[in-house]
Image: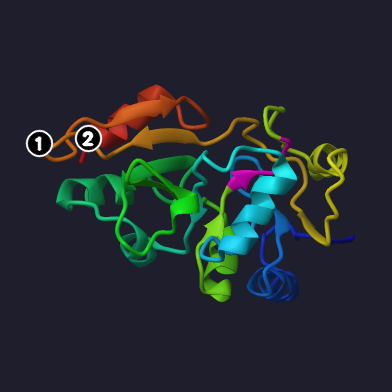
């Protein structure tokens, strides 16, 4: 296994080059995000997504969120209305996963109930990797299904290694500071027009801060 350490600034062109090559070739990479360590693969490659599902030991019926490089990419895979766009720009980049109405470009393995979970982490490394790879990345946490999230690379390697997973490449971002997963927010709402954001999972972004941002939109 190759492990590459990120500098404090989070900029590492050689690491991004190598990681994007692995992902484009159908492999996966363990990466640090702004919340937990994650398994990044090409979310448009069904075989790669199935491999990630298998290595985590998780159900294929459970949808997988994606990481994109910026706002324009969101609308390739989701169909937000004007108010939802304002909320998106208020919350992202940041430690949140937004559940949005899916459009036809999203594969079934990363979608559920006509929704897709989308992240733009507050991480220069993550967004640069997604941009260079040219595809959305899987954003599933780097842990065995049902086990604690990982905030240190060693823990991710130990959990996945215990399942017999062969890890080719991992990026070490040190100990991640938030020690909480992303907050999950459902912005699909109802037929009246997505006016009722719903908190699906409390996480790194506090409820108070979240509601303040949404109310300002």
What's the mark number on residue 173? Answer: none
For the point 67% across and 66% down, which residue is it? 11
For the point 67% across and 60% down, which residue is it? 10
For the point 53% across and 62% down, which residue is it? 127
| Mark 1, other Cα within 10 Å: few <14 / some 14–19 / many ≥20 | few
For the point 36% across and 64% down, which residue is it? 105
Identify the secondary structure beneath mark 1.
loop
Q: State the image coordinates of residue 187 (x, y, percent, origin top left).
A: 28, 39
* Quarter of the image where one finds residue 192: top left
Tell me the quarter of the image containing the C terminus. top left
* Quarter of the image where one finds residue 51: bottom right
**Which residue is label 2 attached to?**
189
**Bounds of the magenta segment:** 140-144
Q: Main SS type for the magenta part?
A: loop
Q: State the image coordinates of residue 159 (x, y, percent, origin top left).
A: 82, 37
**Which residue is label 1 attached to?**
192
Q: Is residue 127 left or right of residue 100?
A: right
Determine whether 201 is above or below 176 in the image: above
Most foreground residue, 18 or 25: 25
Q: Are marks 2 and 1 in contact (CB under 8 Å)?
A: yes
Is residue 109 part of the magenta span, yes or no? Answer: no
The type of colouring in the image is rainbow
Most foreground residue, 135 or 33: 135
Determine whether 61 is above or below 118 in the image: above
Most foreground residue, 32 or 12: 32
Q: State the image coordinates of residue 212 (x, y, percent, origin top left).
A: 29, 30
Determine whether 206 is above or below 61 in the image: above
Distance from Cα at disc 2 to Cα at disc 1? 8 Å
Tell me the quarter of the image containing the N terminus. bottom right
Q: State the image coordinates of residue 124 (x, y, percent, origin top left).
A: 57, 60
Q: Is residue 211 left or right of residue 194?
A: right
């Amino acid at each position: 296994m190759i492990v590459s350490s990120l500098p404090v600034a989070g900029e590492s062109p050689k690491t991004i080059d190598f990681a994007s090559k692995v992902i484009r070739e159908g492999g996966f990479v363990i990466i640090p995000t702004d919340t937990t360590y994650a398994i990044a693969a090409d979310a448009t490659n069904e075989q790669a997504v199935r491999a990630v599902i298998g290595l985590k030991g998780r159900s294929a019926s459970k949808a997988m969120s994606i990481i994109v490089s910026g706002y324009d990419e969101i609308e390739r895979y989701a169909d937000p209305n004007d108010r939802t766009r304002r909320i998106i720009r208020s919350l992202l980049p940041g430690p949140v996963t937004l559940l949005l109405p899916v459009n036809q470009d999203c594969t079934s393995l990363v979608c559920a109930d006509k929704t897709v979970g989308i992240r733009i982490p507050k991480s220069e490394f993550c967004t640069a990797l997604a941009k260079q790879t040219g595809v959305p990345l899987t954003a599933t946490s780097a842990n065995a299904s049902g086990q604690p999230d990982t905030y240190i690379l060693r823990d991710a390697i130990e959990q996945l290694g215990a399942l017999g997973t062969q890890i080719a490449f991992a990026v070490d971002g040190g100990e991640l500071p938030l020690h909480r997963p992303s907050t999950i927010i459902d912005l699909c709402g109802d037929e009246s027009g997505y006016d009722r954001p719903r908190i699906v999972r409390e996480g790194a972004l506090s409820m108070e801060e979240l509601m303040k941002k949404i109310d300002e939109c």
